[in-house]
Structure formats: structure tokens, C-alpha cells
Amino acid sequence: MTICPGTRIKELRILHGMSQEELGKRIGVQRAAINKYEKGTVENIPIKNIEMIARVFDVSPTYIVGWNDAFTNPLAVEVKVLQGVKRFYGSEVVDMIKDYSELTPEGKQRVYQHIADMWRLYNSHQGDQEQ
């Protein structure tokens, strides 16, 4: 199955919560051009635009044109997950994940236990406030 560049551009744009207008501004084209790329109206997207779009979304130009799948690379998957976490929970949570990943197994267990203790404390205070 061949995926057209427009499909990849649209998927990446939506994944990053970006409008066609914003992407257009970032690469120096009108919103209408991005719309045409995504719809497949423009079959030969200028290579410089493909390169700039790839740079905006931190993927390879070959991914945009459908020559490879960014999600076969485990690092690319991790990056996409962290981008989603950042979008929904904020950059502080991404920083915590990165710090957690560098802990020893013992350190990770201590963090987990601390969080469990905090939840018990929080829930006990919630019960006190309802009475």
C-alpha cells in the first residue's frame, strides 16, 4: 500500500495540533498550498517544501513521501509518545518521565511507593472533606 505525501502531512499536522495555516507559515507557503498537498491536488510537492515540513515535524523527508515508515524505528515511536504526553500533560511530565527512566530499579520502586503513599494520603483527605 502506497501512502501519498498529503496523507502523511495531514497525519503529522493533526498529531502536532497544528492548523494548515500555521504549517504554511512555518514553511513559507499559503494555507491553500497545504490544503492542496493534503488533498493530493498537487502531485509534485517541491522538494524544499517536503524538506521543511519534515524538519517541522522532526521526521525524514523519505517518511513524508512514503518511502519508509517512521514507526518502525523504536526511537521514533518513543519521540511520538513523548510528544503526545507533552501535548496533553505538559513538558513537566515529559521531564519527569525522562528523569524516571534514568533511575535504577530500586529508585523506580521508591518513586512508585512514594506515589502510592501520596495517593493514600490524598484519598484519606478527600474522605475527611466530604464528612
Image: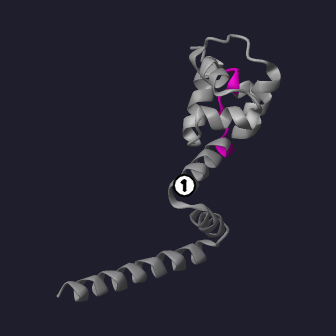
Instruction: Where is residue 19? Give x, y as percent.
Output: 58, 36
Which amino acid is tagged 1?
Val
Q: Quadrant of residue 32?
A: top right
Residue name at image x 57 percent, y 17 percent: 39
Q: Quadrant of residue 4?
A: top right
Q: Between residues 66 and 18, which one lies in front from this camera angle?
A: 18
Which residue does the numbered mark 1 point to in the structure image?
85
Direction left: furthest residue: 131
Instruction: Where is residue 74? Give x, y as percent.
Output: 65, 43
Residue name at image x 29 percent, y 86 percent: 124
Q: Within the magenta stretch, is there residue 14? A: no
Q: Between residues 6 and 84, which one lies in front from this camera angle?
A: 6
Instruction: Where is residue 92? Give x, y as percent.
Output: 60, 67
Q: Residues within 10 Å of mark 1 (few under 14, many from 20)?
A: some
Residue 119 against residue 100 in the figure, above or below? below
Which region shows up in magenta? 64-75
